[in-house]
Amino acid sequence: MSNLSSFDPQLWVQKYADVLYVYTVARVTDTGVAEDIVQDTFLSAWKNRESYKGEASEKNWLFSICKNKIIDYYRKNARSVVRTAKEDIPENDFNEAEHWTKEAGPKEWNVDYTGTIETKEFYSVLQSCKNKLQKMQQAVFSMKYLDNLETEEICKVLNITPSNYWVLIHRAKLQLRGCLEKNWINI
Amino acid sequence: MISCKQATQLICKKEENRLSFIEKVKLRIHLSVCRFCCLFESQTNFIEKNACHLQEHLGHLCLSDSCKEKIISKLKGAE
């Protein structure tokens, strides 16, 4: 049993609120939702503090609670996914023959596509573009590219079919790429 | 020949090695003549590769003080 004196609300929030918040906001994007998730994380941890055995570090314990809260949030959004995935919303990217329109067709970016990018600007545009995605697209994108989960795992967690997954990831990529091109490259 | 919409779908699956032999051939033929889809492939690969660094680049963000105060008072209230 861990020393209960370490369960000091003030100390907890001071030590962990910001790191939990950054972790969460990278995954759910919406800052208001992220704030709620961080608050819920602390509240559940507090309620269950007696069951904390000190096997994991306090930080890892809080993170595991936070991860579950994020998944709960994704799942709540997943309930509507089957309907939206089937609708196959028409896009402006492609013409009637399903080829790129001249306006929407990808333009050359002035970057090394095989390299990595370190500029803060790229990531702030990426974050704001991610925020424009449908919530389920954000969820699959985050699980895939931030958490490196396998497709099967993502489908299982969100209770969606592989074909739902492919529709979501395809749309997410089309939209993110277009949004980045508009807001980052051409500035 | 497959459309650009289909080609971009296949590009998403290719990244995870989910293409059948026929799909690979269809995509290769399309990419050999479509500059747009070639760019789409390079650019989405670029986004994916860099997306994993998103969190570290958001490290400057903080939870607002008012929100922290609210949490602390809720925790104390739950005691």
Image (cartoon, rainbow, N blue to C red):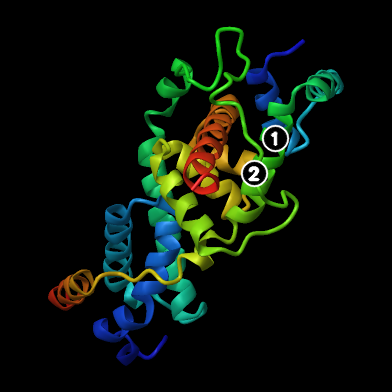
**Which corner quadrant of the image does residue A27 belong to?**
bottom left
Q: Position of residue A130 (x, y in %)?
A: 45, 45
Residue located beneath label 2 in the image:
A109
Q: Secondary structure at mark 2?
A: loop
Q: Position of residue B44 (x, y in %)?
A: 64, 41
Say which mark, if any, is on residue B39.
1
* Residue displayed at 84% across by 19% down: B29
Q: Is residue B11 left or right of residue A30?
A: right
Nearer the observer, A14 or A175: A175
* Residue displayed at 30% across by 86% down: A11
Nearer the observer, A166 or B44: B44
Q: Chain of mark 2?
A: A
Q: Position of residue A134 (x, y in %)?
A: 41, 35
Vertical side of B71 occupied by A144: above or below: above
Q: Position of residue A80 (x, y in %)?
A: 37, 28
Q: Chain of mark 1?
A: B
